[in-house]
């Protein structure tokens, strides 16, 4: 994994957790602007900050360093999205999957 992939991974898992940058900031003590800077790669979080972010999002630290070219990591990510989706969004997810799989 390249360090440039860290920011998008933080953003991805924040969204999976259903948190805004402000909510993640409240849970970790970081200013929302700092969360934004972590996500854009302007700032690189320390190891301690990564632990705090992972804890606040309910994920293991290693997810920030996963290789999303790897099939197992892709399946784990998708499982996490489905597992944490609110009941009202499950129908949308099913429709999106059906649509994606119906294309040749």
Image (cartoon, rainbow, N blue to C red):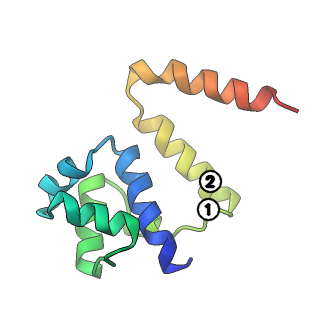
Label 1 to label 2, Cα distance in Å? Answer: 6 Å
Question: What residue do we see at 12% from left, 53% from top?
Answer: 26
Instruction: Name the spot of residue 47 as percent of width and height, x first.
Output: 29, 80
Question: What residue do we see at 22% from left, 53% from top?
Answer: 24
Question: What residue do we see at 48% from left, 41% from top?
Answer: 81
Which numbered tag is attached to residue 50? none
- Is 90 displayed left or right of 57 in the figure? right
State the image quarter where residue 6 is shown: bottom left
Question: What residue do we see at 53% from left, 22% from top?
Answer: 92
User: Where's the N terminus, which quadrant?
Assistant: bottom right
Which numbered tag is attached to residue 74? 2
Crowding at label 1, few (<14), some or many (≥20) Cα neighbours within 10 Å? some
Instruction: Name the spot of residue 93 as percent of width and height, x first.
Output: 55, 27
- Is 77 displayed left or right of 102 in the figure? left
The residue that mark 1 highlights is 68
Mark nearer the N terminus (1 vs 2): 1
- Is 9 displayed left or right of 33 in the figure? right
- Looking at the image, is 48 positioned above or below residue 90? below
């Amino acid at each position: 994994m390249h360090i440039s992939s860290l920011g998008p991974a933080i953003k991805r898992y924040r969204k999976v957790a259903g948190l805004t940058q402000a909510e993640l900031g409240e849970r970790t003590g970081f200013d929302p602007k700092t969360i934004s800077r972590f996500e854009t790669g302007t700032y690189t979080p320390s190891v301690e900050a990564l632990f705090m972010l992972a804890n606040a999002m309910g994920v293991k630290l290693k997810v920030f360093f996963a290789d999303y070219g790897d099939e197992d990591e892709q399946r784990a990510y998708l499982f996490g999205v489905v597992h944490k989706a609110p009941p009202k969004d499950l129908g949308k997810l099913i429709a999106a999957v059906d649509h994606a799989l119906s294309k040749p």
